[in-house]
Amino acid sequence: MMIEVHRRVLTGHRCLAVAAATVFMVGCSSDDDAEAPPAELTATIATIAQEDARCDFGGAIVRRGTDTNRNGTLDTDEVEAEEVVCNDSAADAAPAALISSLVAGDAMPGPGESTTLTVTAVDSAGGTAVTYAWSNATTETAFAETSNVLTIEIPESATVGDEITYRVTVTDSAQVQQIRDITLTVGEPATAPVTTASTTNHQIFLPEGLEAPTEQPTGDFDGVVFFAGEGSVESRKRRSLRDLAGFGAQRRALSQASSQSQDEFDQMRNAISSEAGYTLTNISTALTNACAVGRFSLELDAGTTPTDLVKALLELVGRSTGEGTLGNLPESLEDELAALLYEMRLSVCYFSQEDVVVLLSLVIDDVADLYENVSRGVTDGTNVGDTQSTREQQTDQFTGTGSGGQADFLFVIDNSGSMGNEQEALSQAAAEFINVITSSGLDFQIGTITTDSQTLQGQGYTNDTNQFAADASPGTGGSGTESGVYFAERSLLSTALGDAEDGSSTTAGYPRAGASLSVVIMSDEPDQYSRYASSTFDVQNNLFVDRSYPVYAIINEGSPGDYDDLALATGGSTASIADTSQFPPIMNEIARNAGGAASLFQLSEEPISSTIVVEVDGTRVQADGMDGWQYVAGSNSIVFRGSAVPASGAVIDVTYQYIAEAEAR
């Protein structure tokens, strides 16, 4: 190896400083050499790649010393100091990152338990001579292991909640080096384990049961690819270990115009929906923990396996810079099924133009319900921290009431001439909506108005399925000047809350004292608030925001405006009106989220949802959307369904891990 040596002659002598791959004297006579004192030398012994734990933009490891024997080389006994010198910016050319993935099989092992760390890296010179050095950065002790896989055991003396940082140093054949750290939290059986993927700036926590293969993509990638593992669902129910596929990655923003998570989410969604052969339908899009999260139906023109589809989407929105290539991509398994219809979930967390975290999961639609808790845990916005984040454990205790709380709903239906098919589809989905609400043990009432009047339909607020189905079809003879926002606002005016008059809902006694109130607006045209009011609508300063009334908008997404902005501003969500066949899952999602707002079980911290364990009277309750519990990120609450609704007086313990020092977004 040729070492770059920098020679600096001591002050007071007339020889000039030089830098060369081999040392020689410039501008000095032989007499000068004979008289010169020993020179101070600097030797670069390794180059640091970009995205290193020590240097974001790369740098070098240098040794300094005095050439006492005047041989032009810094010998070992002449070294006085070794230091890391970091580049100031990306403009300082440094080798690309060597490490594309660092994954912990269990990020919260208990005392005496073991877990496996796996790193994927490449040789910048194109060879295979990559070496690995592992250490415990917390105790500053080295491991003997020199492969890319390290099995570690947590000491029996460790205390639950202790943070232990492990470090891997990767060096390639060109003496390019990169360090990456990963921090594990000592856990206990009270919380569910998670897998941790460490990127340059973040830790990503993935649900138990997912499999992150030892061989990960290389090249323009900083993250992890995962599949449904042995423990993701019961083996008798799954069809293949690749029913589910996905990835988590840190990348540069797709658009220089992006300044928040929703901007970048829209860019990625548009990139996917614009791809030939893809039809993407929005089931639900919301903001959670400042990340934009969405659930979609993805229909393909040609049958594709989950592995091949995740590879295509990784190329599309998962590359670090979007400019480089990917290598070492996974191959499909023999038992994988090709499918035309998938459920796709997407989470985008924007930190800066150079730092966006994207999480994407794909499940074959026929079995999507089986993987619901796993796929939500990947993409609900609760599972991204920075590399310095610490995780704490919390148990919240509640007492059961025998019910799930009170929930009131105001539906606003567009009754203009173009809405016949949509009203019929909503009416047919009414039973699905009420079934989900009823299974949560909620005491609910539903009122319906139109986009041209605040008058309540039918008998007013009701909990009868047939009555709601009839109210949801108000006909198509209404005004073409639609404003769901204006008439919902009018209906909810309350003199008791400082308004000049009472609206139709308030006059009817809704929302009830102690009940949550959710507004659902369905329209295929932009809102025309200003046609009825004397001013434009202020999305941030209004009755819905002030009184914590979440708005759910089923709309034509090709015409952005007040509906989608209000939905996101109030903690609600948006969905597409374009495909009426998707109304049942859309209504299911709204019922689930709105039910969370009425939940009596609001958590004190924002959990990593995949770590939650729920016990009722000491017995563990399974996470299940039909007959168990679910976590609702938008309201940070636990909702029970079916026979799992706790009886009055039951003691409910919810234990979880949360990110104590989450990065500001």
Image: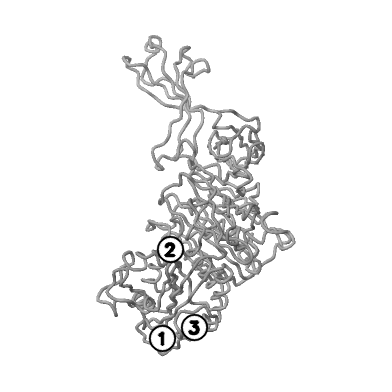
Q: CA distance from mark 1 to mark 3?
A: 10 Å
Relative horizontal placement of residue 417, taking residue 432 as reference (left or right) = left
Q: CA distance from mark 1 to mark 2?
A: 27 Å
Report the residue marked by disc 2: 571
Q: Secondary structure at mark 3?
A: helix
Q: Looking at the image, do the residues carrying marks 1 and 2 touch, with CB atoms under 8 Å apart? A: no
Q: Callout 2, which amino acid? A: Gly
Most foreground residue, 188 or 96:
188
Most foreground residue, 615 or 482:
615
Above or below for 340 versus 149: below
Residue 416 has which mark? 1
For the point 46% across and 44% down, the residue is: 661
Most foreground residue, 16 or 442:
442
Report the residue marked by disc 3: 423
Report the residue that reaches farthest toward the bottom.
477
Q: Secondary structure at mark 2?
A: loop
Q: Looking at the image, do the residues carrying marks 2 and 3 touch, with CB atoms under 8 Å apart? A: no
Relative horizontal placement of residue 69, taking residue 432 as reference (left or right) = left
Q: Callout 3, which amino acid? A: Gln
Occupied quadrant, residue 571: bottom left
Q: Callout 1, which amino acid? A: Ser
* 1 or 2: tag closer to the N-terminus: 1
For the point 34% across and 68% down, the residue is: 543
